[in-house]
Image (cartoon, helix red, strand yellow):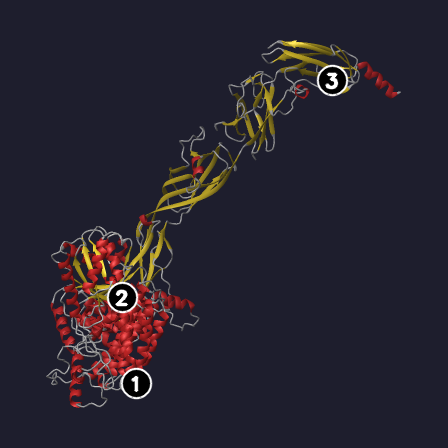
Amino acid sequence: MSPTQWDFPVELCCRPMAFVTLTGLDVVYNAVHRAVWDAFCANRRADRVPISFKVLPGDHEYPKCRPKRTSYEWYIPKGILKTGWMNKHLNLVPALVVVFYELDWDEPQWKEKQSECATRVEIVRQSLQGRNTKVAVVLIQKKTPLPPGEDVIASERAAALCNACELSGKSLFVLPHTDHLVGYIIRLENAFYEHAQTYYYTEIRRVKSHKEFLNKTTHQLLFVRHQFKIAFFSELKQDTQNALKNYRTAYNLVHELRAHETNILEIKTMAGFVNYKICRLCFQHNTPLDAIAQFRKHIDLCKKKIGSAELSFEHAAWMSKQFQAFGDLFDEAIKLGLTAIQTQNPGFYYQQAAYYAQERKQLAKTLCNHEASITYPNPDPLETQTGALDFYGQRSWRQGVLSFDLSDPEKEKVGILAIQLKERSVVHSEIIITLLSNAVAQFKKYKCPRMKSHLMVQMGEEYYYAKDYTKALKLLDYVMCDYRSEGWWTLLTSILTTALKCSYLMAQLKDYITYSLELLGRASTLKDDQKSRIEKNLINVLMNESPDPEPDCDILAVKTAQKLWADRISLAGSNVFTIGVQDFVPFVQCKAKFHAPSFHVDVPVQFDIYLKADCPHPMRFSKLCVSFNNQDYNQFCVIEEASKASEVLENLTQGKMCLVPGRTRKFLFKFVAKTEDVGKKIEITSVDLVLGNEAGRCVVLNWQGGGGDAASAQEALQASRSFRRRPKLPASEVHWDSISTQASTMIISRVPNISVHLRHDPPALTNEMYCLVVTVKSNEKTPVRDVKLTAGLKPGQDANLTQKTHVTLRGTELCDESYPALLTDIPLGDLHPGQQLEKTIYVRCGTVGSRMFLVYVSYLINTTIEDKEIVCKCHKDETVTIETVFPFDVAVKFVSTKFEHLERVYADIPFLLMTDLLSASPWALTIISSELQLAPSMTPVDQLESQVDKVVLQTGESASECFCLRCPSVGNVEGGVATGHYVISWKRTSAMEDIPVISTVITLPHVIVENIPLHVNADLPSFGRVRESLPVRYHLQNKTNLVQDVEISVEPSDAFMFSGLKQIRLRILPGTEQEMLYNFYPLMAGYQQLPSLNINLLRFPHFTNQLLRRFIPTSIFVKDRPGDLMDANQSLFL
């Protein structure tokens, strides 16, 4: 039997399609025929009918048809299903034979051509020999045919041709060779498909007709065979629902067969075939749960049908194939759109297939373990005359024998021996690895990392058994990382043991050392005697000797390995192996810890290296060295102890580099930091511990950073969560879990011994030269030199503050934009002990708000550390937050000459501009002067002079000024007319004389200017007297370019008598003025209302008296006459 006997036949696994043969096509020499054939075969998309085409010659011999049985009464079947039956109906016996013939309807030699075509059809019929295969004729024509009914000649000749060929009209087709050839071919295919379905329907009925002749006593096998044939023909007919129904029936009939050791293999083989078909159709119908249920049922029914105990490995092989085939079907369905999940995916079936393949391997190892003297039988009992079995699942030495009793036990024994000897040549590991690889791919796809790792371990072990140690080591090394990170120490130990064997058998020095180091450590669950053996082998390797073989290794492989180790010893090569321990768990643990998170530059940097060994016996190391990010310090942190490789396990109680298992060893290091490293971080980049020496071989254990290996993080987490009390230890020892790692420290400057004092008067006022006095005093015991001062705005604040803050040392001139916000490295000279000095800084703040100012003083001083004199740069900084406020608030308003508030002013009419300065400073302010800078659109009525010169304002006090202005007519200006600027020159009253004066510019508001047609102003005394004439002149000025018709009337008042025109109408020429004189005679003392002047402009009806009253006074104060006042006083005394 061949090793591939368990593979399903190709004809079983493929999709059954109707088989149609094409004759009469010369695809080699005829271009037209070749184009027709290409149209049938090329680009067969899913939307085209499922047909399998084949070109055959017209006289091709088809398989002979057996004579029809009329009775099954004395017929005894020899098996269930013949091995060639499926292939015969898929590839040999066509459902339809199509005869292609080149013939046009207008062919001149029609009769001869018709006769030749009929002859070809007859030859095809003769070759089919009574089969139900359909025959059709396709005429290849050069012209496109006319629509049916229009070509009378074509109709007549078509009928004649059908009669000559004994064909129905539905079996004659025309194929025009035109540009639309593919379209015609597709139509032909559809017609062929209908003929093929008719043929398979006929075949199904023919097989069904045999059932009435069968009985359940002698024809059990035929029931299964016929049911399988009906289902298979239904598949060819593309009736998958009926196919599935008949396959299910066939499956039940298979399990109704009486099973015996002689036919159990045939029953299982047919059950596997039918189960495969059922599962395939269930997936095709998108009912995966039915497929899974059927497969589970199949396995439950068959897993106990083992058969001959001597060939039980065959059952394991059969079971493996069942799971593999279902996994393939499941995976194929997924690729076509089925959705799988983590708990139900093809990986589980591939895994189970691998499990049975491993069981097959174990059984074969037990059952096929024959002595070397036993040879393969001759003649070969597994060979047949045809080279293949007649029926699926039968034994080659007893084909067709259905008896349960073995007629020739000796022949049976020889056959079994041949199978067993054949099984020995099967490469089981290759089969197992393939299945495991498929399973791993599926579990990786569906994100099942633990299942993937578990199977990869099995793959690695299979590679080990297959003696492919390189691949085994690669897989195991990949998986170890997962088991280390999750803490599966027992599993990790098992994997490491296998990996150690692989590295030994390949004589891989570095891998062997690495795995030995880990198997000696705390992650290993090996017993002490096993660890001692590995420890001894490790020392042998370090002494440049061969290690002892690992247990349970193949004898031949060990001999090969010993030669490789001997070659390794004789070859001169690198004897230093650097092993990074961050990815595994060695038998030595390391932690580095600085004594403090930072050190001053004048204090030695100190740190400890803690080491702990977990090996069975004390171990002596030769060197410990620490590396930093600044390599200049590496030379100060080395401990070295000379020893021979043979002394690694000797003199255990002596030596500073000896580690006792379970005890924590501490090594103290210290060095002086460099002054240029002030402000920098010093990090431990690695710790190297050397085992062995360069005379033999040495291993450098390299810890990155401050130590720690693959298990350290998890162990630290567990220790932090543990509430278990730690046992008491001697004072010289510490608990390993209580040690924390600190692999970096900062070098900071020496502690300064100076005082920095700031003197100033907050808050600062906007734009003033704010004075900040810095006093520096030395408290050092020795002189300091190169004292420098950095002062100004502290960096890192808002960019706007930086742009609006300026610092200078000269307070006699104002800062502009060119001055910086921070003055750096201002030299102050040297300071002796107890000496102090002052420096004045001037700051100008252009905007209000809080600012943080920095005063930074640095200096150099000589100091001695560890008998080494160094120059230390010390510094001290002070920060102060200064609030900047406005010195004063300025209020501006426009009023009329009557001091009434104005929303707008009138062209050429005087108005008043009033300013009010309110001091907001907590310090007294001196107003040096003020200046009104008018815009071109404004003119002063009188001389503009400052009214607040030398005025001192305390907090909350105010100073006011008043200016009389006039605005000429400017037309209609949107947004109003600019007034100008108000400039205030001021300084703090307490400021020194040389401090410059600050000028604050206030932009005056715009004012709306309107034109009025008539302006009226009045000339009258400031007061009047009772019964004394009070002359009043009203001046009416025409402000327009038109002649104004003015109606004037005066309304009397109870407090006055008056003389003058009470009512008048007059005209005022453009730009001229009219004067009206009235004599008012006061009758009463006090603040009296004047007679009301009413003006009506005929051209400007909107000019109202209310507007008029803005320009002229409406009241006046009237005094009593002196004589009247004396008379009134005398009457009071009377």
Which quadrant of the rendered structure holds the N terminus? bottom left
Per the rendering, the mark at residue 478 is: 2
**x, y percent for residue 508:** 18, 68
Q: Which mark is residue 216?
A: 1
Amino acid identity at mark 3: Leu
Left or right: 959 as drawn, with respect to 520: right
Provide the secondary structure element on which disc 2 rests.
Answer: helix
Relative to 182, is 289 on the left or the right? right
Marked residue nearer the N-terminal end (1 or 2): 1
Which of pointers 1 and 2 indicates the residue nearer the eye?
A: 1
Closer to the N terminus: mark 3 or mark 2? 2
Q: Measured from the top left, where is residue 223 in percent x and y?
A: 28, 80
Tell whether 940 sits left or right of 461.
right
Q: Secondary structure at mark 1?
A: loop
Residue type indicated by callout 1 = Lys
**In the rendering, which numbered label is found on residue 1090?**
3
The kind of secondary structure element at disc 3 is loop
